[in-house]
Amino acid sequence: MTANNFRKPVRKAVFPVAGLGTRFLPATKAIPKELLPVVDRPLIQYAVDEAREAGIEEFVFVTGRGKTAIVEHFDTAYELEATMTGRGKSLEPLEPTRMKPGNLVTVRQQVPLGLGHAVWCARAVTGDEPFAIFLPDELMYGSPGCMAQMVEAYNEVGGNLVSVLEVPENEVSSYGVIKPGAVNGKLTEVKGLVEKPKVEDAPSNKIVSGRYILQPEVMGLLASQDKGAGGEIQLTDSMAKLIDTQPFHAVTFEGQRFDCGSKLGFVEATLSIALDREDMGEDVRAMAKRILG
């Protein structure tokens, strides 16, 4: 294939949302963790908003049992809208939750076999097109958004892309890390991927951070892949096989990343975004000063 074959527009995005959210129990006993609010928006809404900004048109949610509320969030709530309209209230807060008919598709991941398996479950919907992947636990905050920055780079180089952030070297063992090649501004050629390396073995301090653009060939690799670390099908293993046959780059995200899969990261995201909001930032800053004495 020529490089032009790896530059089809990115129209579809996969959102793996089947996780149990056990780190947030009991809050997530009945409510999907993706619907926990950061200020006044559910976590999944930030990811969907980021996708829309980047030109994504079709949304594929890979769900599990007990996750139907995520789909309800993006459906039309007739009773709520009728009540709000009858009381003269604006429906503007609901605008981001609207989906065009047919643009949201859900598929089930019946068994928890890891991220690679979750992505593979979406194969019938993504078909022979490139697609984006969003891990909603990682809230990427910035303007333009992370995926918009990645699509801009994709239009330049094509192929496969991951978003990366630079972290202190003593933290690399907690993440997937890229082996870098040539660097051109915020674009880095990817020569290899290493999952949770020892600090002394890490090829760089650039960690993969929850956003991907992948070519459809990755689905075939996932289908034939054996289980890896933790008895799960690791997405990293199949991505690594693409490096030798297709263009593969990393985009250093210019913005903030919040790990909302952890309680501390969730609190940090809530506080940081609240402080950045024009409608409440000053009041939150005053509140924080008062609490801190």
Image (tube, rainbow, N blue to C red):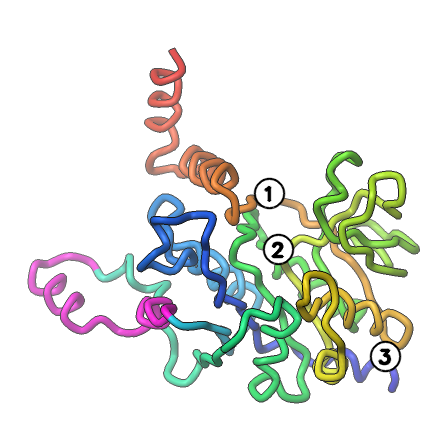
Furthest residue to the top?
293
Camera sees residue 244 = yes
Furthest residue to the left?
86
Mark nearer the viewer, 1 or 3: 1
Q: Are marks 3 and 2 in contact (CB under 8 Å)?
A: no
Residue 141 image position (x, y, % from top left) = 54, 47
Name above or below for residue 154 compared with residue 149: below
Give the labeled residue for mark 3. Answer: 3
Residue 11 image position (x, y, % from top left) = 59, 77
Q: Amino acid at mark 3?
A: Ala
Q: Which labelled disc corresponds to residue 256?
A: 1
Q: Quadrant of residue 119?
A: bottom right
- Is 79 contained in the magenta span? yes
Left or right: 228 as drawn, with respect to 83: right
Which stretch is magenta? Answer: 66-90
Label 2 sits on a secondary structure element that is helix
Q: Amino acid at mark 2?
A: Cys
Left or right: 192 as drawn, with respect to 215: right
Which is nearer the eye, 18 or 165?
18
Q: Amino acid at mark 1?
A: Gln
Label 3 sits on a secondary structure element that is helix
Left or right: 288 as drawn, with respect to 258: left
Disc on the earlier residue, 1 or 3:
3
